[in-house]
Every structure is written in C-alpha cells, then in structure tokens.
C-alpha cells in the first residue's frame, strides 16, 4: 500500500470534514499533480472511493431529518443518467492520449469554477447573517416551511453535476450545493448539506459503476483513499467547531484555483502571479462586500470589538 497516498487522503479528509466540501476537488488533482497518476485513472479511483464515504454523512442527515427528499428525487432524475453519459463521453473521444488530455482540461475548468463557488457560498452566508442581524430574516417563519420545488431547474442542476462527476469526479459536493443555494435560498444550511449528501450517493454510485465497467479503476489507488479519507473526515468534523472556517475556506479556494490553473497548463510563474492577485484582490473585495453589508471591513476588527465589549 502507498502510505504517502494514505496520509494525503487523511489530510484531505480532514479538510472535507472542516469545510463540508466534496473531496474530489482536492483528491483528484493531488493524484495527478503529486503522484503522477493519469487523469482518467485518478478520476475513476476517486469516484469509486467516494461511494464508500458519501453514505456515512448522508445517514447522519437522514436520522436528523435534514434531507429534502423531493429535491433529492429531482436531482437524481438528472444526475444518474448524466453521470453515465459523462463517463461514456470521455470514452468516445478516441485515443487514450486524447482522453487523458480532455479529462485534464475538464478537471482544470471545474476546479476553477469550484473555487469561485466557494466564494459564492461564503457571500450567500454573509448576506443571510446580515438579514438576521437587521431583522429581515425574522419575517420568515422560523421553521422555514418546505420550499416549492422547481422541477426543470433542479433536474438541470442534477444533470450538470452528474456530467461533471462522471468526467472529473468533481461536482457532487462543490457545484451542486452552490446551485441549490441559489435555487432555494429558504433552505436551512443543514438541509442544503443533507440534501446534497443524500443525492450524491446514487450520483457517485452511478459514476463508479460506469468507470468500473470500463476498467478504469486502480484499486491500489482507490483503497488508500478509502482507508485514509474516512477517519480524516471524522477528525475534521470534530475540529470544525474549533477552527476558523473562513480561513480554511479561503485557503481552500486558493488551492483549488492553483490546481485548476496547473491542470490547464499555466506556467508556474504565471500561476504564482494569479494566486497573489487573487489573494490581494480577493481580500480587498471581500472586505468591501462586508462593509456594504454593514460589517467591519476585516474580521479581526469585529473580533477586537467583541473582546472590548465582553467582560
């Protein structure tokens, strides 16, 4: 067994537990960039490993009643056939070299989208906090009754996520939840996560079956991921109440951006300049956004003010 891969899987599992983000957005590029595993093999092995991880998290939410089964059903209508289609599509490309190239490019594009999705997710949360602070959220019923489903849009979101998962292994926990937040802003955060985890179970299972059917899975890669990521995710969940979620998500967005740029073939110097620009520009833009919503420009200003008020 590759113990280096096992320890990397543990570390990525911790990040997943801390942020609630899908592990494919981190594990697949790590397999390609640091372990030299062909993109298609990395995608396939990670998808198969995910089929062992997704049910555990979804079971917790099922017991807590935080799964909207109507939305899960609609998402699955689109995601399961699209996951099969994604795997078949990359197989129809032709030569093995062309397949690997297309998978790598698709993965790079999806990783960049996922990094932007993290920012969108953070903004929606900040806006919700502002509404609660100003009393605007209080006008909504506290239990937030069942949302009115939007069938065609929800099925389309599922199809988009399924296609991306089938081709890149990324999307079940990175892209679909962002789309759900935009479609159903009245859903509680726990319901968003629970619904996303529940629909991801048949989604990744469909993609895994398709990859297994084509013989793309390398069990010497998949097994260490399974053995490492499950305890890592549990540890990350235990640490989530103590760590700064905002700091972790900011670092994660930069990692996803860097991975996506490298997958697209950007040189190292250009990638570093892009990351530096994203860090400086993103920090200033986020501070301005906080200021527009009535918060302090920097988080540390709010913390310092809170310490002064506290006895």
Image: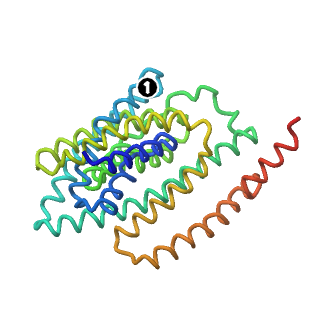
The one nearer the camera, 175 or 241, is 241
Give the residue number, with chain letter if any, for mark 1.
Answer: 60
Residue at image location 48% in from the left, 22% down from the top: 64
Q: SS at mark 1?
A: helix
The one nearer the camera, 243 or 192, is 243
The one nearer the camera, 195 or 98, is 98
Q: In which image quadrant can residue 189 be found?
A: top right
Residue 119, percent from left and from top = 55, 56
What is the quadrant of the C terminus in the image? top right
Residue 207 appears left or right of 274: left
Residue at image location 13% in from the left, 65% down from the top: 96
Residue at image location 26% in from the left, 53% down from the top: 43
Residue 82, percent from left and from top = 24, 48
The one nearer the camera, 212 or 159, is 212
Q: In which image quadrant can residue 1 be found?
A: top left
Above or below residue 259? Residue 150 is: above
Residue 245, percent from left and from top = 59, 45
Residue at image location 37% in from the left, 33% down from the top: 198
Above or below residue 87? Residue 280 is: below
> Across the whole image, how many numbered discs are drawn on residues?
1
């Amino acid at each position: 067994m590759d113990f280096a891969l096992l320890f990397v899987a543990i570390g990525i599992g911790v990040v997943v537990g801390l942020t609630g983000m899908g592990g494919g957005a981190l594990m697949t590029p790590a397999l390609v960039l640091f372990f030299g595993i062909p993109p298609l093999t990395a995608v396939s092995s990670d998808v198969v490993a995910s089929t062992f991880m997704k049910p555990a998290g979804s079971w917790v939410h099922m017991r807590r009643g935080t799964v909207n089964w109507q939305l899960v059903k609609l998402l699955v209508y689109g995601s399961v056939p699209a996951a099969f289609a994604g795997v078949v599509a990359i197989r129809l490309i032709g030569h093995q070299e062309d397949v690997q190239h297309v998978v790598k490019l698709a993965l790079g594009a999806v990783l960049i989208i996922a990094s932007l999705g993290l920012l969108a997710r953070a903004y929606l949360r900040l806006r919700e906090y502002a509404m609660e602070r100003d009393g605007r959220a209080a006008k909504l019923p506290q239990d937030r009754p069942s949302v009115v489903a939007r069938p065609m849009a929800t099925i389309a979101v599922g199809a988009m996520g399924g296609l991306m998962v089938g081709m890149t292994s990324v999307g079940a926990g990175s892209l679909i939840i962002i789309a759900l937040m935009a479609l159903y802003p009245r859903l509680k955060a726990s319901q968003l996560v629970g619904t996303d985890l529940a629909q991801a179970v048949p989604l990744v299972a469909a993609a895994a079956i398709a990859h297994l059917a084509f013989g793309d899975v390398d069990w010497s890669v998949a097994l260490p991921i399974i053995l490492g990521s499950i305890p890592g995710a549990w540890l990350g969940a235990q640490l989530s109440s103590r760590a700064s979620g905002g700091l972790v998500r900011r670092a994660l967005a930069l990692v996803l951006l860097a991975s996506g740029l490298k997958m697209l073939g950007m040189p190292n110097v250009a990638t570093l300049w892009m990351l530096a620009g994203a860090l400086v520009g993103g920090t200033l833009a986020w501070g301005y956004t906080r200021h527009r919503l009535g918060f302090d420009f920097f988080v540390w200003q709010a913390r310092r003010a809170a310490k002064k008020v506290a006895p």
